[in-house]
Image (cartoon, grey):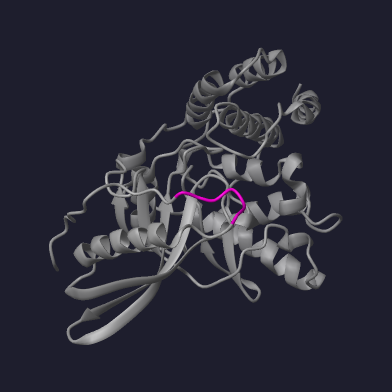
């Protein structure tokens, strides 16, 4: 393997045009050159590395995703592969850590969880202007609303069960053997309290006005935070929109930027959150009752109805904070997509809280 460090002249950030067209040719060429330089140091026994077909994909609201073709010579033979540069933007819906995401993906390579293989990370943004990582591209298509799309009901139910089986597979990852307990920190049976603290910190950072409803719900969450028997790997944004499909099978789970160790019911609370029903549920045949039953069968875990309702409330509150993060980024001028105070979420939370109390 050649030298693992890469000498490049300056960080680069490709300026995006306001009308949605491709970046200027010279800027794109510079980014391709930087990518080739990085890969020259990271690909084993490589030489003559070339990068082409660079394009920013339209998916993803929190990171910049740049897809490209890499070609290189190895032991006299030419090889190639499609890769993706995942880079922090100027403004985002989420503030997350690329080094942390890299650690999760690297750990998952030794498990049965289908996730993209990663090759390189720059946690400080020295080379590309902001924290970035490079990963392999896995074939598949992304469909946020596949469970309520045009496929026959039998196929949609097959996929719905597949998502629950995948969630169970994620929760069965040995977090100690993989090093995730060390890298991510293990809250033990206090996963709920840990998540409240993290998202309250973000809420205090981004709120632009008094939000008494958010404060009231936060106090309710604190007073009723459940304990768990232990912690598992939590994806943090588990949904069809973060998965790749080939035919009627799930090939890859993407976007591990909010992954952490926590309560086993956290991701299930996200899935059964009424605000995301169109993504996760099929009316009449795949709703809360069927999802919980499938989860219990796949994991062997009993699901306390009141505890799951708590996680539903938390999921709505967390989603509200994410929306407020987008609103804050827009106001400060780092994001060009408009967000508004999530008042529409408050009624959802108050209704769920009544079911618990």
The foreground one among 102 and 283 is 102
Residue 334 drawn in magenta: no
Along the horizontal axis of the image, is 199 left or right of 315?
A: left
> Which corner quadrant of the image does residue 149 belong to?
bottom right
> Which corner quadrant of the image does residue 129 belong to?
top left
Residue for point 51% across, 47% down:
235
Residue for point 58% across, 24% down:
225
Count of labels in the image: 0
Residue 19 drawn in magenta: yes
Q: Using the image, determine if residue 23 lies above or below residue 63.
A: below
Residue for point 51% across, 37% down:
91
- Counting from the top left corner in percent of width and height, residue 131 is at 36, 44
Q: Using the image, determine if residue 140 lies above or below residue 274.
A: below
Q: Quadrant of the C terminus?
A: top right
Residue range corresponding to the magenta coloring: 15-20
Residue 313 appears in view: yes
Q: Using the image, determine if residue 40 lies above or below residue 260.
A: below
- Counting from the top left corner in percent of width and height, residue 272 is at 71, 44
> Which corner quadrant of the image does residue 324 belong to?
top right
- Counting from the top left corner in percent of width and height, residue 107 is at 34, 55
- Counting from the top left corner in percent of width and height, residue 300 is at 58, 52
Along the horizontal axis of the image, is 149 left or right of 113?
A: right
Magenta highlight: main SS: loop
């Amino acid at each position: 393997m050649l030298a693992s460090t890469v000498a490049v002249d300056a960080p680069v950030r490709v300026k995006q045009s306001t009308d949605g067209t491709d970046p200027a040719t010279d800027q794109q060429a510079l980014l391709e050159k930087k990518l080739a330089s990085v890969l020259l140091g990271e690909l084993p026994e490589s030489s003559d590395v070339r990068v082409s077909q660079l394009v920013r994909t339209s998916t993803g609201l929190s990171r910049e995703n740049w897809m490209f073709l890499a070609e290189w010579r190895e032991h006299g033979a030419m090889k190639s592969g499609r890769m993706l540069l995942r880079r922090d933007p100027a403004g985002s819906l989420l503030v997350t850590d690329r080094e942390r995401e890299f650690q999760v993906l690297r750990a998952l390579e030794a498990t049965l969880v289908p996730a993209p293989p990663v090759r390189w990370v720059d946690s400080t943004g020295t080379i590309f202007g902001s924290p970035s990582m490079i990963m392999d591209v896995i074939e598949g298509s992304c469909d946020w609303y596949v469970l309520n799309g045009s496929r026959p009901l039998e196929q949609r139910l097959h996929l719905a069960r597949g998502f629950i089986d995948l969630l169970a597979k994620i929760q069965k990852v040995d977090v100690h053997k993989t090093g995730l307990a060390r890298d991510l920190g293990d809250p033990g049976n206090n996963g709920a309290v840990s998540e409240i603290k993290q998202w309250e910190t973000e809420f205090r950072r981004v709120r632009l006005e008094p939000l008494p409803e958010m404060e009231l719900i936060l106090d309710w969450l604190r007073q009723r935070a459940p304990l768990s028997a232990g912690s598992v790997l939590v994806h943090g944004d588990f949904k069809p929109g973060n998965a790749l499909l080939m035919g009627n099978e799930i090939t890859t789970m993407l976007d591990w930027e909010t992954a952490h160790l926590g309560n086993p019911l956290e991701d299930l609370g996200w899935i059964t959150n009424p605000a995301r029903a169109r993504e996760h549920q099929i009316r009449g045949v795949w709703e809360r009752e069927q999802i919980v039953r499938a989860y219990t069968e796949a994991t062997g875990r009993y699901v306390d109805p009141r505890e799951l309702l708590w996680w539903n409330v938390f999921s709505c509150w967390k989603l509200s904070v994410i929306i407020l993060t987008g609103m804050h980024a827009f106001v400060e001028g780092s994001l060009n997509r408009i967000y508004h105070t999530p008042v529409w979420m408050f009624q959802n939370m108050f209704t769920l809280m009544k079911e618990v109390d």
